[in-house]
Every structure is written in C-alpha cells, then in structure tokens.
Image: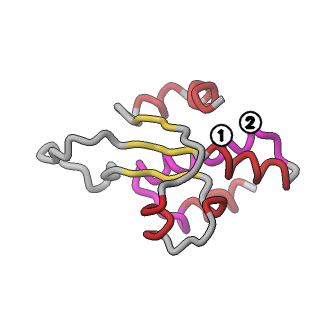
Amino acid sequence: MADEAYLRLPERFRALTGDLVLRTPDYPEEDVLREFGMQSPYELLGLYQGVDLTRKSLFDASGLPDTVYLYRLPILRYWREGTDTLEEIVEHVLVHEIGHHFGFSDDDMHAIEDEAD
C-alpha cells in the first residue's frame, strides 16, 4: 500500500526524492520514541530520517540513505479510530514525511494543508 501511494505521486515529485528508502516496520524503535518524548508507540505514524534537501551537500558522506518510515500498527489503529480511508492515511503520512525530506517543518506542512482546505 505504501509503494502504491508513492507511485500515485506525480512523477516530477518522485524524481525529487532521489534514492529515498521507504520502510514499513510495525512500530517505531524505543530510541525514536525516547527522542521525541513519546510514551506510546502509537503516538508516531511516520518518520523521516536523513539530511533534508535544504541542508544536503555533495560532501555529505553519511553512508545511510534518507529513509521514510511508515509505522504499520499505529497507522492501522489511527484508521480504525477515524473516518479516513486507510489509503488516505498512508498517502497523507507518506507525503508529510517526504515534506521533511524537502526541508519543510511540521508547522510549514500544517500551514500548507490548512491553505489547501
């Protein structure tokens, strides 16, 4: 489903993501939850890890690929408790995390979403 959501994104948009890796583990790792001060693994639906494009340099040699995580069980719980379709939620979380790859903050993306509504 995550791959299908990614393929539905416009080609021009996908081309800008480069070698971004998409992962779908069940839950976030404990160290990730601690980093964000979260008590429950259900609090986090997705995560971008990497150097965003606004800060990336040709001299960056981290060796680790930029990665978007979509956490399956928190997303399923969110879907079960809400009214959006599972596909809509997966696509929304995916686009949100790719937004971080492009250098947008959470506040930036919420403002864009509010403007689009």
Residue in view at x 59 percent, y 72 percent = 39
* Quarter of the rendering occupied by the N terminus: top right
Residue 92: x %, y % from top left: 66, 46
The reply to whether residue 69 is visible in this rendering is yes
* Quarter of the rendering occupied by the C terminus: bottom right
Residue 93: x %, y % from top left: 62, 48
Q: Nearer the viewer, residue 12 or 25?
A: 25
The residue tagged 1 is 91
Which range of residues does the magenta coloring cover? 84-108
Residue in view at x 50 percent, y 65 percent = 33
Check the image and name the residue furthest to the left. 59
User: Relative to 38, is 21 above or below?
Assistant: above
Q: Is residue 57 left or right of residue 42?
A: left
Label 2 secondary element: helix
Q: Are marks 1 and 2 in contact (CB under 8 Å)?
A: yes
Residue 107: x %, y % from top left: 55, 68
Residue in view at x 42 percent, y 63 percent = 31
Label 1 secondary element: helix
**Residue 38 in magenta stretch:** no
**Tag shown at residue 87:** 2
User: Relative to 98, is 107 above or below?
Assistant: below
User: Relative to 20, is 103 above or below?
Assistant: below
Q: CA distance from mark 1 to mark 2?
A: 6 Å
Give the amino acid type for the residue marked by disc 2 in the picture.
Glu
Residue in view at x 83 percent, y 47 percent = 84
Q: Residues within 10 Å of mark 1 (few under 14, many from 20)?
A: many
Q: Nearer the viewer, residue 2 or 99?
A: 2
Check the image and name the residue furthest to the front. 30
